[in-house]
Image (cartoon, helix red, strand yellow):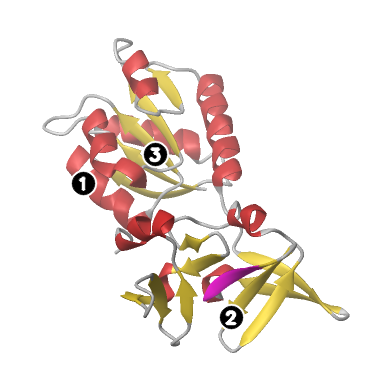
Amino acid sequence: MRALIVDDEPLARRNIRILLERHPEIEIAGESGSGADAVEQIRRIKPDLVFLDVQMPECDGFDVIEMLGSNTPPAVIFVTAYDDYALRAFDAGALDYLLKPFTDDRFDRAVGRARQRVQQQRKPEHITVKQGNQVLFVRLEDIDWIEAADYYACLHVGAKSHLVRRSLADLEQDLDPALFRRTHRSAIVNIRRLRALQLNRNGEYEALLENGVIVPVSRRYRRQLENTR
């Protein structure tokens, strides 16, 4: 896991860093001394875990969460010397609320909860495909689009295609919604391959991919696609 420490007090950041160094599975990706800087760093380095001070000048912890919106990291642990904000913190989606001064054991429990949350939300980076006497590892980012084929799903990767014995709905659970979007009940596209939405002769929309492939688009999913870029 990658962690970011946000607190306007250097000593407080140092204390959390020392405690985190006992957890080798966590990489300290950075520190921030203000809310505005924290928003910029979170958007840039995309940490899994953020230790977030509540009270900071100009932009507090709650402002940070509001500004991030859907880009909020999977695990946010609020750290503060005040217990007044606990209910508001959980309403804002905080995973935990560390009240200073806290014990090492209490800190470790918070980290354990964060580890579990991140593992639950982390998406796989590849799909395994059986082909003859081989098992292929197809990277998700290499997939152009996915097509439903009865009880199978067909992965279109460049000029190649691979069948996996999974329904489109089941496969969709493993896909990052920031990268893949449903266009139709029978199709999912990699939005990085999406060139345009265009009207066909029947007055219906279709998705034009970078490689020239045309994928059907239903009214249900068109508006979501229009907001992807």
Q: Earlier in the sequence, mark 2 or mark 3?
A: 3
Q: Secondary structure at mark 3?
A: strand
Where residue 33 sits, quadrant-wise, is: top left
How far apart are the alpha carbons under marks 2 and 3?
A: 36 Å
**Amino acid type shown at disc 1:** Asp
Q: Secondary structure at mark 1?
A: helix
Q: Residue tagged by mark 3? A: 50
Which sits in the foreground, 194 or 128? 194
Q: Is residue 216 magenta?
A: no
* Residue 13 image position (x, y, % from top left): 33, 35
* Residue 28 image position (x, y, % from top left): 43, 48
Which sits in the foreground, 50 or 199? 199
How far apart are the alpha carbons under marks 2 and 1?
A: 39 Å
Residue 27 vertical placement versus 95 (above, below): below
* Residue 134 image position (x, y, % from top left): 83, 79
Which sits in the foreground, 131 or 218? 218
Marks 2/1 in contact by CB < 8 Å: the verdict is no
Residue range in magenta is 144-148
Where residue 8 sits, quadrant-wise, is: top left
Look at the magenta stretch and give its main secondary structure: strand
How many numbered tags mark residues here?
3
Residue 80 vertical placement versus 65 (above, below): above
What label sits on residue 37 in the rendered view?
1
Residue under the image location 36 percent in, 14 percent down: 87
Q: Earlier in the sequence, mark 3 or mark 1?
A: 1
